[in-house]
Image (tube, rainbow, N blue to C red):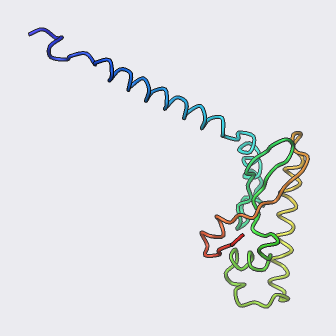
Amino acid sequence: MNDQQDCPSMDSFTKKYLFFLASLAFVALVWWLSSLDFRAGEINDLLAADNEIASYPYPFRVISVNKGVAKVSSPRSAELSALQSLRVMYPKLEKSDATSDEVMAAQKQLAHVQSKVAKLIKGQDDVVRIRWVLDTQWLSERGIQIFQ
């Protein structure tokens, strides 16, 4: 027997179908690559290099940088008080009064770290302003649901 009979070539429909699938995969890859924000990743690497920020219980991160505005995740906002966020980050504060020394110290530390994050990000030439965004996914993973 010759090799052509053992391995018949693809028919026209199969060739067109495979070409269509390959084209679709290529378009999806190009779309995915174009949606990546490499600049946000670079700034996140800068934040991770800072020991104080990296060791803080909440992982501050840049979500995107667009036209000079850096969207940065935050554990607090108008929808969620700092106290609720602190109780997620520091479970020992669960029963503490809002005016206790421990809560006040934790609030001061959160403000300090968030301010340091802002300073590092604003120190970038291409960032003019920061827009803080409540990290609902991080909170949800810790049992706090935010309904907007």
Residue 130, image x, y percentages: 86, 53
Residue 53, image x, y percentages: 77, 59
Picture mark count: 0
Q: Residue at x 45, y 27 (%)?
A: 22
Say left or right for 135 vs 32: right
Residue 119, image x, y percentages: 89, 54
Q: Looking at the rendering, in which quadrant would you find the C terminus?
A: bottom right
Q: Residue at x 65, y 75 (%)?
A: 144
Residue 122, image x, y percentages: 89, 49
Q: Is residue 101 above or below residue 139?
A: below
State the residue in front, 107 or 75. Answer: 75
Q: Residue furthest top?
A: 2
State the residue in front, 29 or 16. Answer: 16
Q: Is residue 113 above or below residue 45?
A: below
State the residue in front, 148 or 55. Answer: 148
Task: Classify residue 12 by image quadrant.
Answer: top left
Q: Looking at the rendering, in which quadrant would you find the N terminus?
A: top left
Q: Residue furthest left?
A: 1
Q: Is residue 127 above or below residue 50?
A: above
Task: Classify residue 60 by image quadrant.
Answer: bottom right
Say left or right for 12 vs 59: left
Q: Residue at x 70, y 74 (%)?
A: 89
Q: Residue at x 38, y 21 (%)?
A: 16
Q: Residue furthest front?
A: 13
State the residue in front, 1 or 148. Answer: 148
